Image: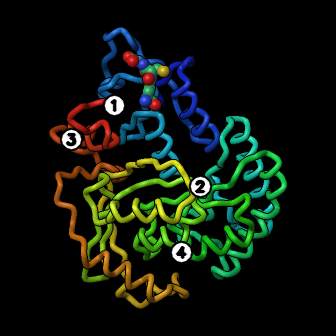
Amino acid sequence: MLTLFEHPLSAYAMKVKMALLEKKLEFKAMTPDGMANGTAGGAFVDANPRAEVPTLIDDDVKVFDSTVILEYLEDKWPAPVLLPKTPADFDASLANLKKAITRAAGLGSPHVRCLAASDREHLPPGTPEQHIETMIKLLRAARTFAMDSGVKLAVENHKDFHAWETRMFIEGAGKEFVGSYLDTGNPVFVLENPLTTLEVLGPLAVTVHLRDTAIYEHPRGCAVQWVPLGEGAVDFARFIARMREICPPTNVFIKPITGRPPQVIPYLEPTFWETWPKAKAPDFAQFVALAKSGRPYEGHVVIEDIPGRTPPPTLSKGTKRRRRPPWHRSPAGRA
Ligand SMILES: N[C@@H](CCC(=O)N[C@@H](CS)C(=O)NCC(=O)O)C(=O)O
């Protein structure tokens, strides 16, 4: 079970508790002894050297900083997604979306993040064209509600659809109330160079999230691994310059998720393409060019995000350090 070190009066901890409850995840909440007076210790400080709440323990994984915890939870339990599993689930998906809009409006947020389907392997039965149709129908069904609430739907390009497919349902529904939550870590999982994703979705961006990827050729295709920003193959100088030209004014976030092993994308195997029947050759060429330009990650790396595996104690310090966002890893320390 998940353990959350928290304090009932901490707004940071409340953020995390809301996410845990919303995702219906079981967790044990504990208020650590000795907080804020320098005497905290034990499992709490072991998990978070900053001795701050919230701190989350998920078996071997220890995560701190409320925003990083939210990203961890969303990454591991991405729910609820928009695309209904069956036609009978359409109304439940719409109700979920409306609930999310209501909450965003209640918090004063101009956007609500949405996921179409999380990843390609878990799309419901049907063709990509049918899924795009369903997405348009679902989003349109929430149009009046979203517009009246003053909230724009920000659909993340995840590991589910090519950028041009995502653009089809955003534009098909109506860009006056749906936009792109543009993420640079996911494109490689849909065979795209993040610069291609930017070209396609940039003009619709309502928020931009930066993540870097090491990518390189592999006998079965290529391998990819999320790495700290600036240490992978993505050309961020070019990305930001182009973003300035084509994106509407928007906030840019740094969204670190590292500590995972490299993952092979076996595009040299014919069966791989069954999932991607309409991939576009020019986009794929840009992706292959990126893979050819990159190389394996050679920085010190502790792969900790593997279920059932505990990093040896000698590595735990490095693990903690690398899990911190880049600005905490700077020589100046905590920003
Ligand atoms: N950036 C952190 C801030 C967390 C934070 O400041 N927590 C406070 C309680 S609201 C805390 O634990 N303070 C204890 C201390 O500073 O010793 C987050 O978002 O989680």
Query: Which of the two marks, 3 or 2, is nearer to us in this view?
Result: 2
Q: Nearer the viewer, residue 145 or 240?
A: 240
Q: Which residue corresponds to the image point at 32% horizontal and 65% vertical from the top-left?
A: 235
Dot placed on the residue nearer the N-terminal end, 4 or 3: 4
Tell me the CA gap for discs 4 and 2: 18 Å
Give the quarter of the image for residue 91: bottom right
According to the image, label 3 marks what residue?
318
Question: x and y percent of residue 77 in the render?
Answer: 53, 51
SS class, disc 4: loop
Dot placed on the residue nearer the N-terminal end, 1 or 3: 3
Q: Nearer the viewer, residue 156 or 74?
A: 156
Question: x and y percent of residue 168 in the render?
Answer: 65, 75
Protein image colouring: rainbow
Left or right of residue 192, residue 324 in this image: left
Dot placed on the residue nearer the N-terminal end, 2 or 1: 2
Query: Which of the two marks, 4 or 1, is nearer to us in this view?
Result: 1
Tell me the CA gap for discs 4 and 3: 35 Å
Dot placed on the residue nearer the N-terminal end, 3 or 2: 2
Question: x and y percent of residue 185 in the render?
Answer: 41, 61
How crowded is the residue under tag 3: few (<14 C-alpha within 10 Å), some, or many (20+)? few
Query: Which of the two marks, 1 or 3, is nearer to us in this view?
Result: 1
Residue at the front extreme of this rendering? 245
Tell me: residue 99, above or below residue 212: above
According to the image, label 1 marks what residue?
335
Tell whether label 1 touches label 4 (CB within 8 Å).
no
Q: Which residue corresponds to the image point at 31% horizontal and 30% vertical from the top-left?
A: 334
According to the image, label 2 marks what residue?
206
Left or right of residue 151, residue 215 in this image: left
According to the image, label 4 marks what residue?
162
How crowded is the residue under tag 1: few (<14 C-alpha within 10 Å), some, or many (20+)? few
